[in-house]
Image (cartoon, helix red, strand yellow):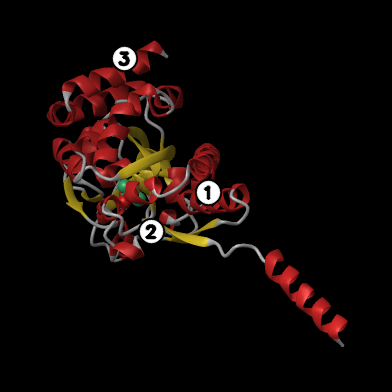
Amino acid sequence: MTIARSSLAALLASAVFALPVSAETLRLSHNVGDTTTWQKGAERFGELLAEKTDGAYDVRVFPNAQLAGGDQMRQAEMVGRGALDLVVTSAINVTPLVPEMAVFSLPYMYENYEQVDATTQGDAVGPLEDILLERGIKVLAWGENGFRELTNNRRPVTSPEDMRGLNLRVAGPMYIDVMNALGANPQQMQWSETLSALQQGVVDGQENPIGAVIIPQQVYEMQRYMTTWHYSYDPLFLGISKAKWDSLDAETQAQMQEAATEAMEYQREISREATAEGVAFLREQGMEVHEPTSEELAAFREATQPAFDTWAERVGLDLVQSFRDAIEAN
Ligand code: X2X
């Protein structure tokens, strides 16, 4: 009896010790749907973090900016003051808080992915990471929304003249100026409201990256024409609230950093793959896709130059130059 009882106690004790320490769940907010590469990158981060910390941490992903009441620009500010642990969002959404973040998306800043990587995967982003840290956001890694392409329901767009009078949904303030320079009628709107606005014809069109957003969010079901004009590039970043980061021990920080780097590398890869296969897929779905010639691209670049100049001033000419230097050194 006594023996049985003590072995039962031993059994119970070992069972208790065998249970994993209960995990701390971190909340991660992003502002597009759960079918996107943003979601997949965020989920991959959670898996890797759980793996590397032996289950001490896991991540719950909340799409569609639902933790910020659907307001995609509010997420960064919430992470900054510690109201959210983690965010995956695009640079555009941070421009109200940190105008310098518009540097990536200046019209025709980049021609290709090599130029992009020369900045986002190198030292050029250092000053931006410093500014974000001052605002309470520690950047862990850079991912990719992508080159933003135009879709609309009115007509094929092959020149700046075709843009005149198009009612376009845009994500942020810089794109208002860019679209005005092209003679379109831009309107800032949450992404969470855009799909229904397109469906109901409230706006004629929008612009977003093919692999990360247009295909997974089935924009092709509401839009007939696309122009792959690569007019603006938009990176993502995975960031953590500085307060939360500072509360972690050095080992956990290193594990989290690794998880973030690997997850955003994966996220960039799947976004680029989906984009590369995307135009053929969109044509199969019935979209009419125009891939501009270099002369046509030059016309768009020239027409958007005034918006570039205005926003280069706002961003800071030194920062713009440092990006150009990094691109050229590549
Ligand atoms: O709102 C958009 O267009 C999106 C999803 O690309 C951004 O978050 C900037």
The x and y percentages for residue 252 are 51, 45
Q: Earlier in the sequence, mark 2 or mark 3?
A: 2
Query: Residue 142's spot in the image, x, y percent?
Result: 42, 37
Mark 1, mark 3: which one is toward the viewer?
A: 1
Image point (62%, 50%), residue name: 51
Q: Residue furthest front?
A: 2
Q: Residue 117 appears in which quarter of the rendering? A: top left
Q: Residues within 10 Å of mark 2 (few under 14, many from 20)?
A: many
Q: Nearer the viewer, residue 87 or 146?
A: 87
Describe the element under mark 2 as helix, strand or loop: loop
Task: Give the label on residue 222, or none.
Answer: 2
Residue at x-position 42% and y-position 50%: 214
Answer whether labels 2 and 3 touch (C-beta < 8 Å).
no
What's the amino acid at mark 3? Asp
In the image, taking residue 81 as reference, residue 289 lies left or right, namely right
Between disc 2 and disc 3, the foreground one is 3
Disc 3: which residue: 325
Q: Is mark 2 within 8 Å of ligand 1?
A: no
Q: Amino acid at mark 1?
A: Phe
Horizontal arrangement in the rendering, residue 179 relative to residue 228 (left or right) = left
Which residue in the protein does label 1 denote?
45
For marks 1 and 3, give the CA distance.
32 Å
SS class, disc 3 = helix
Q: Which numbered disc flags the more N-terminal residue, 1 or 2?
A: 1
Task: Give x and y (percent) for residue 330.
Answer: 42, 14
Labels 1 and 2 touching (C-beta < 8 A): no
Circle 3 Cα neighbour tier, 10 Å, few/some/many (<14 / 14–19 / ≥20):
some
Instruction: Work out which quarter of the rendered image holds the N terminus and state it.
Output: bottom right
| Residue 108 circle label | none
Q: Is residue 275 left or right of residue 19?
A: left
Q: Tag 1: Cα neighbours inside 10 Å, few (<14), some, or many (≥20)? A: many
Q: Work out whether mark 1 precedes mark 3 in sequence or the reverse, and give the earlier one.
A: 1
